[in-house]
Image (cartoon, helix red, strand yellow):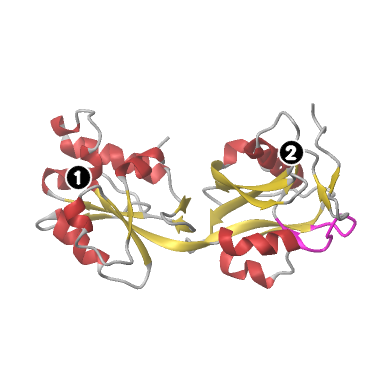
Amino acid sequence: MRGDGDGWVVGENGTRHWGKHGAAGLLLRAPAPDGGPTVLLQHRALWSHQGGTWALPGGARDSHESSAHAAVREAHEEAGIGLEHLKVRGEMITSRVESGWSYTTVFADAEVQLDTIPNGESVELRWVPEDMVDQLPLHPGFAASWPTLRTETLRVLLDTANVLGSRPDGWWRDRSGATAALLSSLAAALPRTVELPGGGFGWLPQVEAVLEGEARNARFEDGRVPVIHASGSGDDELARRAHDGGTLTALVTADRGLQQRLPTDVRVLSPSTVLSWLG
């Protein structure tokens, strides 16, 4: 029933947490004009619990709701943002107490910084650059979880031939056309928040696609997926670029020989991981 989650859960030591069935909040990211990640934060009304602090739009989860549904609903109620303007990427329980109460952070991305309409629970809603979030007076619960939630800008190199070859969809009959279709689908999935192998999150504004052979004839142009034409072996080009350093880098490939040529600090993403982004 709508609203049956409203209420406090009181622990044995008297601590109170809002939401009879737990609570959820929406961590919504969107690119700034320079492509860097920004986060939508709510300046909580003074009358509310921990009023005056900054946190995510969110609230109590009703008994019939998933955490994602609750977080998106709360964002709509508190910020005027609808589901059609965002894409949910995943979720993580970021707080759990002995009473059984838990808080789930739901990750979502938007293509642009969406307009917001605050309700009475907000003093202000603001898109805040990620590197400035911890400069604000944060809600204690959000402050505790923020170090595990923040992203690092991620550079991704795409072994396009390897990813294309991982799907038995007849790509070999028109390699250049299949390449263009793959890159178009990938561009539509960006920018996005990415869970990294081994833990942590990356902010992915673009993917660098290396093309070799016939695939270099692909007709494709989109700033979200810059194309690199290898003059010779695609593997050689990928390995060279992976050694550039300076930025958290991941390479998308299932080619073990190529993986062995990479610096130890380069993450490896499987083709299936990237293909799952295409929905």
Identify the disc placed on residue 55: none
Q: Residue furthest top?
A: 1
- Which of the 4 image quarters holds residue 189? top left
* Residue at image location 35% in from the left, 62% down from the top: 249
Seen in the image, is 28 located left or right of residue 116? left
Seen in the image, is 85 located left or right of residue 213? right
Q: Main secondary structure of the magenta part?
A: loop
* Residue at image location 23% in from the left, 40% down from the top: 164
Q: What amino acid is found at the position of numbered circle 2 in the picture?
A: Arg
101 in the magenta segment: no
Residue located beneath label 1 in the image: 161
Write the start and end of the magenta stretch as one range.
44-55
Decide: is 6 above or below 224. above
Seen in the image, is 271 located left or right of residue 136? left
Residue 147 on image: x %, y %:
59, 64
Residue 220 on image: x %, y %:
27, 45
User: Which one is closest to the eye, mark 2 or mark 1?
Assistant: 2
Query: Foreground: 160 or 252?
Result: 252
For the residue labelled by badge 2, is the local secondary structure a helix, a strand or a loop?
loop
Crowding around mark 1 (Cα neighbors within 10 Å: few <14, some 14 to 19, many 20+) is: some
Decide: is 70 above or below 210. above
Identify the disc placed on residue 61: 2
Residue 31 on image: x %, y %:
52, 57
Query: Foreground: 187 or 219?
Result: 187
Please identify the quadrant where the N terminus is shown.
top right
Q: Is residue 185 visible?
A: yes
Please identify the quadrant where the C terminus is shown.
top left
